[in-house]
Image (cartoon, rainbow, N blue to C red):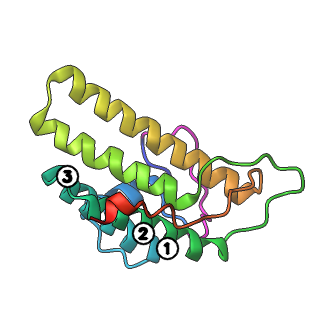
Amino acid sequence: MSAPNSRYPFPAQHGPFLSPHELLAAINGSSDCDQPLARWARTLGSLYRDWLAEPSAVWVGRQIAEVAHTIDVWITGQLPRPRPGAPRGIDTVGGVIGRVAEAATSAHWALHHAEDAQRHRAWHHLAEMRGGYEDLVRSVLEGSVDLPKSWPSISWPAAAT
């Protein structure tokens, strides 16, 4: 069943993915779903809330990158192979879920801390990211996109201090 704001019906069989509604509920900490992606989405939501509370906390950025990489390593074995000739995607599943978590956390923060125009833009951005996640899931399940391989990111020496 698709959420009311879906642009298209979300696939009933969505493999290891969460529906957009389930993903946002997990990010916001309002889901008790115990699927792996839900647990990692909850962690990402919590990390972004920590980052909003303490913007100079470099360790949070490193942990976000680690969780996104963990998602990518896990989900790689869960996905169908892309069709031959499928165009390459430009982001990994973990990267997309991380950006949805960032957008959701920012939108909720904006409710209480931003002017009307900024608040509206934050929620519009979240809607765009939710739609992008939906499109990614559909494309992956159809085999119509070849996702890039994950890597754990750069560990900048300055970030370790």
Q: Is residue 1 visible?
A: no
Secondary structure under the numbered disc 3 in the rendered image: loop
**Residue type at the position of mark 3:** Ser
Give the labeled residue for mark 2: 67
Whether pointer 3 and pointer 1 mark residues with C-beta atoms closer than 8 Å, the reply is no
Looking at the rendering, the stretch of residues picked out in magenta corresponds to 5-16
Marked residue nearer the N-terminal end (3 or 2): 3
Give the labeled residue for mark 3: 56
Please state the horizontal and vertical placement of residue 142, each as a whole percent of the image.
Answer: 74, 55
Please state the horizontal and vertical placement of residue 98, each as a whole percent of the image.
Answer: 42, 56
Residue at (69% x, 59% y) in the render: 141
Question: In the rendered image of this protein, does residue 136 appear above or below residue 15?
Answer: above
Q: Specify few, some or many for label 3: CA neighbours under 10 Å numbering under 14, 14-19, or 20 or more.
A: few
Whether pointer 3 and pointer 2 mark residues with C-beta atoms closer than 8 Å, the reply is no
Marked residue nearer the N-terminal end (3 or 1): 3
Which sits in the foreground, 143 or 65? 65
Question: Which residue appears farthest toward the top when viewing the image?
Answer: 117
Whether pointer 1 and pointer 2 mark residues with C-beta atoms closer than 8 Å, the reply is yes
Secondary structure under the numbered disc 1 in the rendered image: helix
Secondary structure under the numbered disc 2 in the rendered image: helix
